[in-house]
Image (cartoon, rainbow, N blue to C red):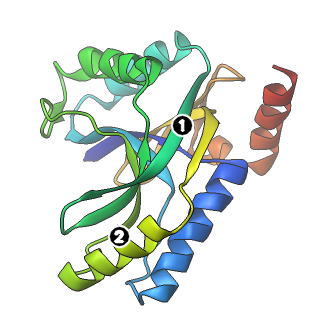
Amino acid sequence: MVYYIEIRYFGKAKKQIKKLINKVDNKFSLRKYRKVTHITLIQPFTTNKQKWLVSDFKKICSKQKLMKFTLDGIGVFPFFVVFVKVKINKELVDFRKKLLNQIKNYCNIIDIKRPYKPHTTIAIKMGFINFFRVWFYLKRKPKIMFTNHILRATLLKEKKILYEYDFLSRKLLNRKQAKIRKVLSKTFKKLKNN
């Protein structure tokens, strides 16, 4: 089984990035597939120790304070991906390191030594000409820049939510709980009162 760990967008940030993705998809007739706005923390990995993975995910997340991230302009991985840059901050990098160090002994993590470049993908696999068209189009737009709280960390299995850790309620949510809007609205209320 293939796993990922990521941070998903919620609220206004999610709407803003989703709107940009849809605008680019429509303007350049890009292939439509379900794009979940996220920042990857740990790229695809495999393990046969799912119970350990879930336990360690919960343990590391439960020790983590509420974090923020800042989006800061457009970037590219040449000829393949156009993305919104996420400013690297110490909290996010340290959180990722703790997760990696905890699970690396029993997980097969692809490119574990690859430098971490947090980002949110806007367009991918679009061909050489569209790559440049999308990139130049976004470069001419007003710079994307805002800061947002990281409400939850998500553990995915085969690209579906296995668990999410809610940093405000301090709870591990299973897939069903993570998808309940009422649960998320309680998290937003706690954020407002924080």
The x, y position of residue 129, in whole percent, is: 23, 84
Relative placement, left or right, of 103 versus 14 is: left
Q: Quadrant of residue 49?
A: top left
The x, y position of residue 9, in whole percent, is: 58, 47
Residue at image location 70% in from the left, 23% down from the top: 168
The x, y position of residue 154, in whole percent, is: 49, 38
> Within 10 angstroms of label 1, few (less than 14), some, or many (20 or more) residues?
some
The residue labelled by disc 2 is 135
Residue at image location 79% in from the left, 36% down from the top: 188
Mark carried by residue 8: none
Secondary structure beneath dot 2 equals helix
The residue labelled by disc 1 is 70
Relative placement, left or right, of 188 versus 73 is: right
**Residue 35 visible in the picture:** yes
Q: Nearer the viewer, residue 44 or 1?
A: 44
Q: CA distance from mark 2 to mark 1?
A: 20 Å
Mark 2 vs 1, N-terminal side: 1
Residue at image location 55% in from the left, 76% down from the top: 22
The x, y position of residue 65, in whole percent, is: 59, 14
The residue furthest bottom is: 29
Vertical relation: 152 (above or below) 65: below
Q: Nearer the viewer, residue 12 or 104?
A: 12
Secondary structure beneath dot 1 equals strand
Q: Amino acid at mark 1?
A: Thr
> Within 10 angstroms of label 2, few (less than 14), some, or many (20 or more) residues?
many
Q: Quadrant of residue 62?
A: top right
Q: Quadrant of the C terminus?
A: top right
